[in-house]
Structures are given as structure tokens and as C-alpha cells.
Image (cartoon, rainbow, N blue to C red):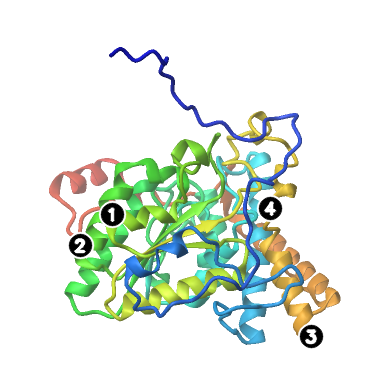
Amino acid sequence: MRNRVSLNLHIPQPKHRPGEKAEFSYVLVPKAGIVERPASDAKAQDITSLAYSLIRVLDDEGRAVGPWNPKLDPETLRKGLRAMMLTRAYDDRMFRAQRHGKISFYMKSTGEEATSVAYALALEHEDMCFPSYRQQGLLIARGYPIFDMMCQCYSNARDPLKGRQLPIMYCSRKDGFFTISGNLGTQFPQAVGWALASAYKGDDRIAVSWIGEGATAEGDFHHALNFASIYRAPVILNVVNNQWAISSFQGIAGGEESTFAARAIGYGLPGLRVDGNDFLAVYAAAQWASERARANHGATLIELFTYRVEGHSTSDDPGRYRPADEGKAWPLGDPIERLKRHLIGLGEWSEAQHETLATEIAELVRETQREAEAIGTMEGGARPPLGTMFEDVFKDMPWHLRAQRKQAGA
């Protein structure tokens, strides 16, 4: 029999386009506190529902509710709030520096600060992080100097990476921050490999990685999950679903058909889907997954459900593919405002304190920028010494590089 129905393809399309009204009625946001928290050693097949729900702790009034509440002390909450505020202020300042021609490129993490800062506080400092390019909050929360971050962006003489990386592609071994790779999918298999090595050596450190939802369509994502599952690697694999991969929305990567957390199920891994704008929920999920990894129960895949408020980078104009007010309509709100409201509700913060802290942070970032720019920017100033281009590649420099360095007079 001949098929009389014409075949056609489904081409995923975003719900809103420029000029249209943004609304997210199709995003199901369950009440905070209703998702059960299993033991961290639960079998993956017994908790598959967590891949389709949404772990939330902060309710609409800013109260921490439900079994996932990590019950953090006020000082830790204030530390997290400050780190998120500093990350945003730093982003804003460096974005303006790029627009003034002082650096070549920049990427902001506005609206996604909790996905990195909460992790930095939940993990051990020695754990190794394999970040994407919107996890600068990890470094900031771990106390890495924003002066060094700025110098890296300017590629000046104080650049810790000696001008070898694009701006924002930071690296700090002592702070457990693996070099950012422009080929983002590679971070997952590298994290799994590092975790396997840690377990093979009998170490006690775990690995954590982040990629965007767009990179889940790459082979590296699946290779990493396969190895993580087979060998029960002590690793946490985060998919930051911020709804947009450059100019293509998350449906292009498969987000219309299922959740990204659900991809864990086929590999026999637990998958958690978490409100990425809820600092407490992200902290709790990181805590649960790290407990699991440290007890040799294996890897966890976590989808951090959030929204990319700004453009993909300074090379991107989001107004060409989505409504200008779409970020304001995002139903999960702003991570900084939500944590601030929670602290105020506890009686551990106030609007006046918040305003004072914001002013202090703004002045800190301004003054640090002056110091960094006094050394040099893309427009001019001191650069890393010429001889450094021959260093940091081989443990023992081969003869031909020694000859080239001599020829260059370096």
C-alpha cells in the first residue's frame, strides 16, 4: 500500500519573535518545596521523576520551604549574595570596557549568577571545575582577584595567561578552575576524565562541569555521559539551560521534546532539574550530587533551568531574534533579587544594607579597573614579555623553540 499522507519535518520555532509580546505561560513552574528529596545513594531508576520536575526552595514570598532547603546560615547567604552582586557589577563594567574598545570581546552572565556562585559555596575548594564561559562567579566566589580577571581580559603585562586566551577564558589551577575552552562540549569529557583519574589515584576530589543546552547536541556530551555511567565517575555534569544558544533557542537542541535532565535516564544516571535562579535550590542540588560522588555512587546530570538575560556575547544582538522584554517576563525572576528578599524575610538584611553593599561593590570594581587599565588595554600599554610565547607548552623546552627564542632576541 502506498502512503497517501505527505511527509513533513518539524522545525522547532521559538514562541516569540522581535516585536511580539513575550509571555511564558507554556513554562510549567511548580510550587516551591513540593519535590521530594531522596537519599543521595538512591538508585537512578528509582528517581527518574526528578528529571521532569523542577526543584525549587524559595517560594513567591521568599521563604525557604520543602525538603531541599539546605538550611544555610545567614553569613553563607550574605556571602553568596555579595558574590553574585560582585559578579554582575564586574560583568557590567567589562561590557562597557569592550564597547569603549579597550577589550576585544566579552560575555556576561546576567541572570545566571546562581548557577556558579551557589556551586562555589557548596563544593570543596580543591574540587576541580570545568566551566563554560558564563561561570566567572566561581572564581569570584572562591576569592580570585577581579584585578587578575581584568588583566586577562585586557591581555596586558599582568595577564596571568600571558595573552594566550580570549578575554573571559580564565584559568586558575590553585582555585580549581580549569581552562575555559571555546569548543564548549569538550569540557564534559575532560571533566569525566579528570574525575576518573582522581578515583583511580584514590584521591578525594571530585570534578564538576558546565555546558549550555546547545552543546548537548554535540557528540562530546554523549561520550561523557557514557563513560561517567560505566565507570561511576565522581563528577557532576551541569547543563545550563538558559533558553538560547547564540541565536538558536533551546528547542533546536531538543528541549521541546523532553527536559535536558531526562537525557541522564538512558545512561542509567540520576537527572535533576533545578530552578537555576533559586540560589538555595542550586546549592542543595550541588550538595546532593557531591555527596553522591564522594560516596562512590557515581555521576549526576543536572539541568539548571534559567534564562540568558543579555546577548550571547558582545558580538551578538539578541534584539534580532527575540523580544526586547523577554527577560523581564521570565517567570523564575532574578537570582539576586530572590536571595535578597529571602534574607530580608529572615531579618538578616535590609534595603539600606543592600544599597550600601551595591555602592561599595561598584566603587571596588571602578577602582580595580583603573589599576588594571593603568598597566594596559587593547588600545596600548605594557604587554607580556615576548619570551613568554615560548613558555608553558613543554616541560622541557625543545631545541627548536630555544633556537627560535634566541633568534627573536627574547
**Label 3 neighbour load within 10 Å: few <14, some 14-19, many 20+:** few
Residue at image coords 71%, 77%: 63
**Label 2 neighbour load within 10 Å: few <14, some 14-19, many 20+:** few
| Tag 1: amino acid | Ala
| Tag 4: amino acid | Asp
Question: Label for residue 224?
Answer: 1
Q: CA distance from mark 2 to mark 3?
A: 47 Å
From the viewer's perspective, tell me whether residue 182 is left or right of residue 307.
Answer: left
Q: Earlier in the sequence, mark 1 or mark 3?
A: 1
From the viewer's perspective, tell me whether residue 49 is left or right of residue 106.
Answer: left
Image position, residue 1 (x, y; %): 28, 14
- Would you say the residues marked 3 and 4 are in contact, meaning their CB atoms lie under 8 Å apart? no
Q: CA distance from mark 4 to mark 2?
A: 42 Å
Which of labels 3 and 4 is toward the front? 3
Which of labels 4 and 1 is toward the front? 1
Q: Is residue 249 visible to us here?
A: yes
Which of labels 4 and 2 is toward the front? 2
Under tag 1, what secondary structure? helix
Q: Residue furthest left?
A: 399
Question: Label for residue 230?
Answer: 2
Residue on which disc 4 sits = 92
Under tag 3, what secondary structure? loop
Q: Eyeballing the image, is 13 above or below 144?
A: above
Q: Earlier in the sequence, mark 2 or mark 3?
A: 2
Question: Label for residue 347?
Answer: 3
Image position, residue 144 (x, y; %): 52, 69
